[in-house]
Image: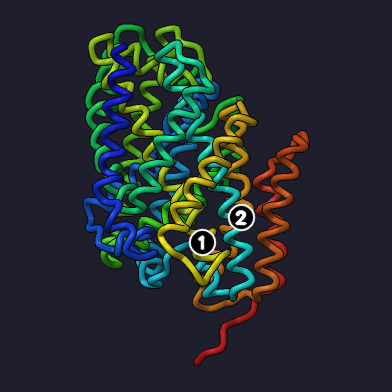
Amino acid sequence: MRFAFALVAYGAAVLAVGTLVSRRAARSPEAFLVGDRRFGRLSSWAALSSTTIGGSTTLVLAALVAANGLSGLWLDLAGVGGLAFLGLALAGRVRATGALTLAEVIGRSYGPGVRRVAAILIVFAEIVWFALLTQATETVVTTATSWPGEAVLVATAAIFIAYTALGGQRAVVGTDLLQFGLMVFCLLGIALPSAVVSLGKTGLPVPLMSFPFSATLGPKDVAALFVLVGLPHAVGSDVWSKLLSARDEATARVATLWAAASKLVFGLAVAAIALAGVAAGQPGGPSLFPRAVLLLSGPALAPLLFVAMIATMQSSSDSVLLSAAGATVHDLLPGCPSPCRLRMFVVLHGLLGLLVALWLRDLLETFRLGYTIFASGLILPTLAGFSRRFQVDGRYAATAMILGGGTAVAAHLLRMRGIDPVLVGTAVNAGILSLGFRRRQRS
């Protein structure tokens, strides 16, 4: 009953935020997608941090640490590296484009045809990511309660969809402030100190203290993580939507670097919580993190930590829904990018993501598929578009996106032994892209 009350209260709070800003979000596509670009450093930092600290920095990271030892931290360190690169090299330039979506930025480099190809890949990836985050929420809720998993999946997805459709980017950033506050207070302020105290009593699980590599996670695996996770943090439609919503270029740069620091802190905290959970006898897998957090917090604080973990999952799910709707309406169906149509596609893509979540019942499998589509298809052509010395023929860029992403997904689905799908797909992408390079002519 306590968990039900906490979930209902939290759901009411985020829906209230969406309702309060719904009228302002409906003024124009720019208001819906980037909140009229009025977000300062604090809001942009909280939004970026919340977006990049979700299911992968909690449930998946904890599972990797339990399976591979501290070397599993490379999942988080890869994301930190991607954000740091973005903040130092690209964030200001992304904001300076004045675009509304990642696909629009790509289209300015390669033309409208490539923009549509990019938008299709973005939509597919974001739908799978939404499925991942609803599955992560289901894992948290079913770990703490005896509620049926599929009912939880549908109910929580409905909350995510509703407030995102109501308020657009304003609702996303508004709830990000609430969610990030809960994450800091509960996970860093309560769960982390409890984990440290618990490890002081049980001792460290020595077999899991291997870093930087372990018997099950070597240099090749770390390289794959930097491609799979690091590059999407440098070039991600949900991440870039926050940059495009920032007040100015300086705000975008500073907020991105602060978000990289936040992600590092949370990653270390999650690793400590995972180690404490394993040392206390909790089994590994995606449910390790919520089990460990609830065990360490004790019954009195469990409902508060329960809500904080849901907020962590939700802080990313709304962003991917908004990015998918933006790519569809603004990039694939130009001519009538009304807030009403954007809201309709938030709902549609949320329902498609829910179907994917019901189909792919393995959280780690969904995680790999979502990142594989994006990392192997979109990132290298996007980065090449920002080169000041070279440019790529749009035909090669489109082919690299399609064949790079397609090769990676095929290798993933076929489970080819000894072949990392992301590395293979990225290699195909890079090879095709290199054929279209030519030196820019000076104006």
Q: Residue at point 69% right, 41% down?
A: 420
Residue 132 x %, y %: 53, 35
Q: Is residue 71 visible?
A: no
Q: Is residue 348 visible?
A: yes
- Asked whether 16 or 313 is in front, the reply is 16
| Relative to 33, residue 135 above or below | above
Q: Mark 2: which secondary structure?
A: helix
Q: Mark 1: which secondary structure?
A: helix
Q: Residue at point 61% right, 57% down?
A: 120
| Relative to 176, residue 266 above or below | above
Q: Tell me the quarter of the picture where residue 53 sits.
A: top left
- Asked whether 114 or 264 is in front, the reply is 114
Q: Residue at point 39% right, 69% down?
A: 93
Badge 2: few (under 14), some or many (20 or more) residues near its Cα, within 10 Å?
many
Left or right? Give the position of 376 relative to 233: right
**Nearer to us: label 1 or label 2:** 1
> Which residue is the site of mark 1?
329
Mark with earlier residue (1, 2): 2
* Type of the residue with mark 2: Leu
* Type of the residue with mark 1: Val
Residue 135 x %, y %: 51, 29
Residue 184 x %, y %: 25, 33
Q: Residue at point 73% right, 38% down?
A: 413
Badge 1: few (under 14), some or many (20 or more) residues near its Cα, within 10 Å?
many
> Which residue is the site of mark 2?
121
